[in-house]
Image (cartoon, rainbow, N blue to C red):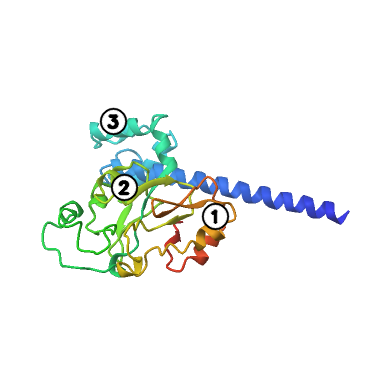
Amino acid sequence: MIYVYILVLAIAVLATIVCINLVTKQRKKDNREIVYIQSLLPDLNCKKCGEKGCKSFAVRVKNKEKSITACPFISSQDIDKYRKYFTEEQSANFQQVAVVHCHGGCDACQLTEYVGSQTCASENCVKKGRFSCKNACLGHGDCAKVCPTQAIIINEKGVAEVLQERCIGCGHCEKMCPKHLIQMISANAYVQPLCAYTGSQPVQDDCKVGCTKCMRCIQTCPTGAIYEKDGVIKIDHSKCTSCLACVRVCPTHVISRIK
């Protein structure tokens, strides 16, 4: 009889975990939509829409309780952006987030000083940049400049980093990166390899924290979600269970939690 109680308890616990995960995912999606709506507003907090401020107005718009046109200062172009984004087709964007496949920055070997226009596009034209790793983030923030929700920062290591709770999956940053280091992945992903090194020499000659291709992550993954393609470690998120085994065995912390 006790085994029946244990089984029932286990099923109840599992059902609770599933419900919590579903609620959490929906909440994150809702937050990204609110952030996007707020980015279209003039941020005047004038209260002429009848709300306390632009954020509370964005929440009401997201919940379909108010029309975005109730803002007296929003431009017609931004209204068009809102309508385009919240069609059934465009809403699929919120199922993706951007990830920067580099975490080298100050840990990457710098060959020379760069003097010129402080953009990634300009520096990349000069021998692919100042780092010996030609897959290194140049850190000038071209991607951050085109992000409509300020979801990208340049972190303390000088590398572009995506704040996923603000990312709406628009893909503007992916198109802007001259080194193609930014990729759109599933918004449900918990781990991701943050290195795109494809050099022929040992990675430590170019970056202290690059992927060593030790294959421990592949050998450790219980579901076969991790694989190598074109010399780069990748993850099939449809197979990943977020067990974090790969994160624990990675010697240079290339595979990282992104949530």
Cβ–Cβ below 8 Å for labels 3 and 2? no
The residue lying toward the viewer, choosing from 121 and 14, is 121
Number of residues whose C-alpha sits closer than 10 Å to that of mark 2, classed few (under 14), some (14–19) or many (20 or more): many
Q: Residue furthest right?
A: 1
Kind of residue at disc 3: Asp
Name which residue lies at 35% across and 43% down. 36
Estimate the spatial distance between the alpha carbons at disc 3 and disc 2, rounded to whole Å.
Answer: 17 Å
Instruction: Answer left or right for 234 relative to 161.
Output: right
The residue lying toward the viewer, choosing from 161 and 207, is 207
Estimate the spatial distance between the alpha carbons at disc 1 and disc 3, rounded to whole Å.
Answer: 38 Å
**Res 98 seen here:** yes
Name which residue lies at 29% across and 40% down. 40
- Residue bearing mark 3: 80
- Residue bearing mark 2: 149
Q: SS of the residue at dot 3?
A: helix
When the figure is inspected, residue 218 is found, relative to residue 26, above or below; the finding is below
Name which residue lies at 55% across and 61% down. 245
- Residue bearing mark 1: 242
